[in-house]
Image (spheres, rainbow, N blue to C red):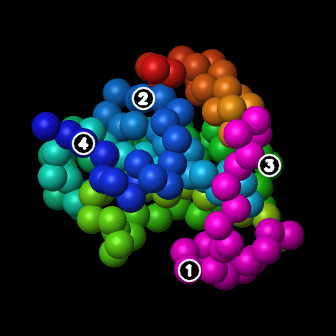
Amino acid sequence: MYSLHSQLAADTELVGRLPLSDVLLMNNAELPWIILVPRIEGATEWHALREDHRAQLHHESILISQTLMERFNGDKLNVGSIGNMVPQLHVHHVVRYKSDSVWPKPVWGNIADQPYSPEVLEKMLSHLRKVLTKTGKMFRAD
């Protein structure tokens, strides 16, 4: 039975669900940052997924990548699945700007913890849900 790793649960808010993955918003107001987590019990590596799951995760990652860059007009998109601290398979999608506080360094280990205010968090979640619903790619905001 799938369950979200406790660290991911502590650091994120649920935006909604795609056919394979939960779509999570990293609670850091510094940058637009989405994490996809496939709802597959015990999954730790992308390459170890069944072929159909690998393809679906790739499709969902591209959808999130395109949506983030279109909506937030970043200079660069960082996509990574590191998993050194959290073994559960999860894929980060971080919009980067040449003006952000840690550019050009990676966000991991360099960015300050800046949680969204409750009001801004709700606006961001609502915006992302609306945008992803419009993609018509079986996104569910539940």
Pointer 3 local density, CA inside 10 Å: few below 14, some 14–19, many at least 20: few
Can you see residue 65? yes
Residue 118 vertical placement versus 79 (above, below): above
Q: Are marks 2 and 4 in contact (CB under 8 Å)?
A: no
Residue at figure coordinates x 35%, y 72% from the top left: 85
As helix, strand or loop, the secondary structure at mark 3 comes to: loop
The amino acid at mark 1 is Gly
Residue 98 vertical placement versus 5 (above, below): below
Relative image position of residue 15 (x, y in whole percent): 53, 33
Is residue 100 in the magenta section? yes
Report the residue marked by disc 2: 17
Report the residue marked by disc 3: 73
Report the residue marked by disc 1: 109
Q: Which residues are magenta?
A: 99-120
Tell which residue pokes out farthest to the right in this image: 99
Q: CA distance from mark 1 to mark 4?
A: 26 Å
Relative image position of residue 105 (x, y in whole percent): 66, 82
Relative image position of residue 50 (x, y in whole percent): 15, 46
Pointer 1 local density, CA inside 10 Å: few below 14, some 14–19, many at least 20: few
Question: Which image quarter: residue 67?
Answer: top right
User: Which of the two discs, 3 and 2, labels the residue nearer the N terminus?
Assistant: 2
Instruction: Nearest to the eye among marks 1 and 2: give it.
Output: 1
Q: CA distance from mark 2 to mark 4?
A: 14 Å
Q: CA distance from mark 1 to mark 2?
A: 28 Å
The amino acid at mark 3 is Asn
Q: Are marks 3 and 2 in contact (CB under 8 Å)?
A: no
As helix, strand or loop, the secondary structure at mark 2 comes to: strand
